Image (cartoon, rainbow, N blue to C red):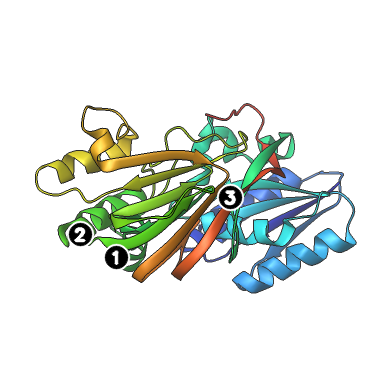
Amino acid sequence: MKHIFVVNPAAGNGAGLTDILPKIHKALTGFEEDYEIHRTLSEQETILYCRQKCAFEGDVRFYACGGDGTVNNVLSGIAGHPNAQLAVVPCGTGNDFVRNFSGKENILQIEKQIHGSVIPIDVLKWSGGYALNMFNIGVDCDVVAEAAAMKSDRLKGTAAYVAAALKVLRKGKTYRMAWTVEDHPEQEGELMLAAIANGHFCGGGFRSCPDAELNDGYMDVCIVHPVRGVKLPIMLARYRKGTHLQGKDADRYIEYIHCKKFKLRALEPVRISVDGEVLDFRDTEFEILPEALQFVLPEGSACL
């Protein structure tokens, strides 16, 4: 087994180099198996590098050292290669995917990652490639973009996302969209957001899809219809905690769906966040690929 540490030097304002890299070197002291440390140059370079390693190496374990975007890039490079495994060493801003596992202290220890167990988990597929955690469209995506724009030395991580959410929600923006679940007739309406998920969390810890499971063979879709007035801050607080599916008025605002395929079509300009990376969006079909990835669960950690 070859071990490859894919380090994004820009992740977490340089945390990939100042924090994670020394930990990697320390953990690899005396390490007898074949290993390599690769510093990423760009999104496409990372994807191509991982793809080539899968093609020319035997069994290989990739350690994505960065944020959710770095994880997505490595995933895109190894997708479809049964000889590849993926471990996640978080050093980005949101780090939402690793929130799906217990034992954060284990996830941050390279030794625990090296000695971790391998479990199969699902992968999300769309016209633009793959996602491991979540797609967000509408307010959720605008919050991701706003958080990236307002990051500073004072405002980081979850605090940046909360501040961005308050700023975006004050605008009262909604989005005209059409959607199809499996083979049912298309629906159309005004939405605040849509989250298409494999994992629970987005936006630095908002638990948008609390019933999601990483290996159940289904995606979770959370559609939120317009919420206004005094209900809006209440719904925001519930959405953050993951309790928005509860309460007597939940059905009025929220549709929560388990499915294998989901189509979404934007009827006005809108963007999509793909594992935290913001892109323009028109329409696509989302699909779940059951147990398509061999994921490394750090020693001592478990799925939520």
Which quarter of the figure has residue 230? Answer: top left
Which quarter of the figure has residue 155? Answer: bottom left
Left or right of 45? Residue 128 is left
Label 2: few (<14), some or many (≥20) within 10 Å? some
Foreground label between 2 and 1: 2
Residue of label 1: 150
Residue 116 visible, this orientation: no
Circle 1 SS class: helix
- Name the spot of residue 98 as percent of width and height, x first: 53, 42
- Name the spot of residue 24 as percent of width and height, x first: 67, 49
**What's the residue at 24%, 60% (across, down)?**
174
Question: Which amino acid type corresponds to the residue marked 1 in the rendered image?
Answer: Met
Q: Which sits in the foreground, 288 or 41? A: 288
Mark 3 vs 1: CB contact within 8 A: no
Residue of label 3: 132
Give the distance between the C-alpha atoms of the residues marked 3 and 1, in whole angstroms.
26 Å
Mark 3 vs 2: CB contact within 8 A: no
Nearer-N-terminus badge (3/1): 3
**What's the residue at 57%, 30% (across, down)?**
303
Nearer-N-terminus badge (2/1): 1
Q: Which disc is residue 167 wearing?
A: 2
**Rendered view: 301 above or below 220:** above
**What's the residue at 24%, 43% (across, down)?**
236
Nearer-N-terminus badge (3/2): 3
Label 3: few (<14), some or many (≥20) within 10 Å? many
- Name the spot of residue 261 as percent of width and height, x first: 56, 49
Mark 2 vs 1: CB contact within 8 A: yes
